[in-house]
Image: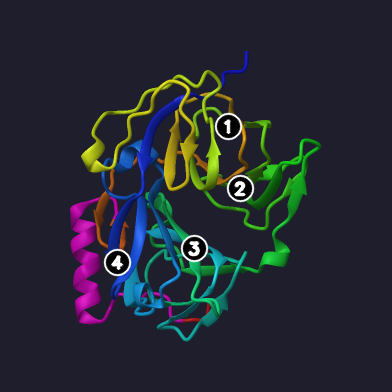
Amino acid sequence: MDKTRKIKQLYKSVPTIEGAGVHLKRAFGNREPEQLDPFLLLDDFHSSDPQQYRAGFPWHPHRGIETITYMLEGSVEHGDSLGNKGIIGPGDVQWMTAGSGIIHQEMPKGEKNGAMWGLQLWANLPAADKMMNPRYREIKSGAIPEITTQAGVKIRIICGNIEGMPGPVRDVVIEPEYLDITIPPETTFSHPVKSGHTAFAYVLTGAAYFDKERDSWARKEIGAGYMDLQRDCLIKNESLVIFDNGDHIVVTTVADPVRFVLVSGKPLREPIAWYGPIVMNTQQELRVAFNEFQNGTFIKYTGKI
């Protein structure tokens, strides 16, 4: 018997500053990382003021994770210590597997009117793959399929498979699904999600019910970014919905449309040792990584990726 996923937790994204002074909203980070395993962090960088993002994210290392950048407005110019470089713009995705280690920079560039909007998601790598060779998957907007259902729901498929239509990102060990979904007003949308997989939605615009019964409760720690979800409560933009286990989700709109990303993946259930941009399994592995960064032996793979 199918089981609809209820809301397990609800967060409001929290303002923070990262890189060389980039103002962004953090949907989740290293607070209780096990509850969103295998996902580690989701940042929403959204501004029309270039002073809030122009300084960007200068050279910094990564090891043991994948970073997934999805641009909605503006662009990001990236480069790394191996000589790779490129630009991703509206609708584009960069899926970077840091693996054994990479040193790179990401420099945002706004639209002519200054608008900049993107999401960056971090996904953990299992212990067996943490020291794999790094790689990039740069997917242009035109390569991301979009379908429209009979009810008018639009779905961009970054990875996953909808009605036999696969997204361009495949062969990832955590079996992720990453969808950009827009639901018109007065519409109910149901979507299957693998039982046992972690699943969350992050609301970009609009509002909707993300629980079939409209009757789930969140922890009442408002000051720490938690939200108190009450009965018959529409969930609005910059909100993170973490779903409980089940076979599918149900989202219902009323007067307004809603746009959100829906992400799911297979939990790793491994120890997490995390400091800054490096995520390993043990504190000793972390010490080794930072010692190597200091002494110039951090990069293990020296070819183009």
Q: Secondary structure at mark 1?
A: loop
When asked about the image quadrant of residue 248, the answer is top right
**Foreground pick, 303 / 5:** 5
Looking at marks 4 and 3 on the same chain, the residue that comes earlier in the sequence is marked by 4
Kindly indicate whether the residue at mark 1 contacts the one at mark 3 (C-beta within 8 angstroms).
no
Query: Among all residues in the image, which is located at the extreme top?
Result: 1
Instruction: Read off the residue under disc 2.
Output: 179
Looking at marks 2 and 1 on the same chain, the residue that comes earlier in the sequence is marked by 2
Instruction: Read off the residue under disc 3.
Output: 118
**Magenta stretch?**
280-302
Query: Badge 4, how many Cα within 10 Å: few under 14, some, many 20+?
Result: some
CA distance for labels 3 and 1: 27 Å
The residue that appears at 28% across and 49% down in the rendered structure is 30
Give above or below for 1 relative to 285.
above
Kindly indicate whether the residue at mark 4 contacts the one at mark 2 (C-beta within 8 angstroms).
no
Callout in the foreground (3, 1): 3
